[in-house]
Amino acid sequence: MKIIKNPSRSNWKEILARPTSDISEMENVVKPILEEIKKSGDTALDRYCQKFDGIGIEDVRIASDQISKSEESISEELKSAIDQAAINIRKFHESQVVEEKEVETMPGVTCYRKSVGIEKVGLYIPGGTAPLFSTILMLAIPAKIAGCKEIILCTPPNVKSGVHPAMLYAAKVAGVSEIYKIGGAQAIAAMAYGTQSVPQVYKIFGPGNQFVTAAKQLLNSEGVAIDMPAGPSEVLVYAGEGADPEFIAADLLSQAEHGVDSQVVFVTVEEDMIQKVQNELTIQLEKLPRKNLAEKALENSMSIFMRDEKNAIELINSYAPEHLILCGKNADEISGEIINAGSVFIGNYTPESAGDYASGTNHTLPTNGFARAYSGVSVDSFVKKITFQKITEKGLRNIGNTVMEMAEAENLDAHKNAVKVRLSKLASND
């Protein structure tokens, strides 16, 4: 990891830049895939599935009995872990459902809001270098809580043209029965446009590689809803007095092993902590099966010493990390100063991996600085808010002049007349 000491504020943007690729290159590859599937449906989808996934269109849908029997192919320990994670995730997300109240803004004028589940949603779950069954729980459980009627799941097949049984069991636990063995941009296109084999959805969720991200962003520009802009995963670990270098190194590596384009950042006000963490990284790295991936990710990463806590917090908020771990004695106090982050992990005994799997919070989070304006996935991500209003005769008399005055000032006479004719009829009935 690069070591940077007391960087000038004017250099923060430069040193905190993410190692992202040129999205235009990805779009040039992805756009023809989207266009062909939009135009030709299954015919184009079959061609891309055979080319990239090694499977024909007739074999992409996973049978329901294969999903129902999936638990027979995983250990009891893993089954129990998935069950426990699902319980925690469901409990946390159910707490997000709030009953809206009717509000009388003035006598006779009542307004309220109703949350309605998005009818059809698509979930993309990467296969790649690891079967990310935890992401199924993170997306499908809040979708079910929100009341989505149709949940479509796409995931690339493995080298045996199958899907890991843990993926199928997680889908079963979360209540998903429509699963397709389709990966990459072709999966995103199939869900966005719909084909003879894959139903169309109204909003697409889930992480993926840069081709998947490019596909989602291109479709978003066409009006297809997506969860959020997302790029390679990232973590920032802050260490104050009392932080444990062994824990910090473990957290940094847990993020670095995601892939070569992941970024990890270590920020501290304890100057000697940088070398202690570096020593631990060297020790722990040797034991990792994904050592090569983690090593390359660390090359894009940095350790930053800040002269005081105030500047450190400002740098953290400027970076807006996807994951933020706060270590040390005053972690709770510092957490109150955080305004830009996807998810925050407080204290020496709160590793990011707990949130990634089982504490209950969602791990689908904004990356690349989007935490300045975007939230992570929640039940709200799967609903639309519809406002309602009802005005009585008394209410129209109360609000009518206000509406007519404003409409007239904007030269919208028909708007004014819509109120005027009603008030006139009320007056004639008095």
Image (cartoon, grey):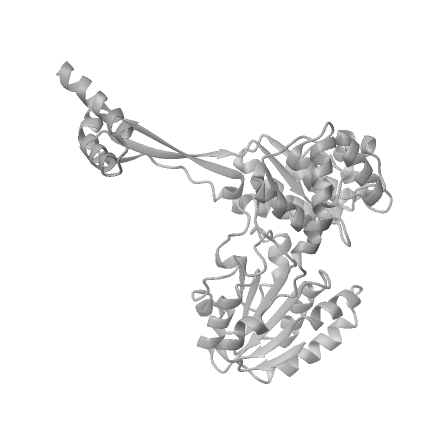
Counting every numbered tag in the picture gives: 0
Residue 46, can we see it? yes
Residue 84 vertical placement versus 317 (above, below): above
Horizontal side, residue 362 vs residue 83: left or right? left
Give 92 or 6, whichever is nearer the viewer: 6
Residue 59 vertical placement versus 300 (above, below): above
Residue 231 spot, x, y in % from top left: 63, 56
Give 78 or 218, whichever is nearer the viewer: 218
Q: Quadrant of residue 396?
A: top left
Horizontal side, residue 234 vs residue 12: left or right? right
Quadrant of the snapshot with the N terminus: bottom right
Q: Quadrant of residue 46?
A: top right
Residue 172, can we see it? no
**Residue at image coords 52%, 80%:** 306
Residue 50 spot, x, y in % from top left: 84, 40
**Residue at image coords 58%, 78%:** 304
Q: Residue furthest front?
A: 411
**Residue at image coords 56%, 55%:** 366
Horizontal side, residue 410 vs residue 213: left or right? left
Residue 294 vertical placement versus 387 (above, below): below
Q: Quadrant of residue 282?
A: bottom right
Q: Residue furthest bottom?
A: 272
Residue 300 spot, x, y in % from top left: 68, 70
Q: Residue furthest top?
A: 429
Q: Residue furthest left?
A: 430
Quadrant of the snapshot with the C terminus: top left
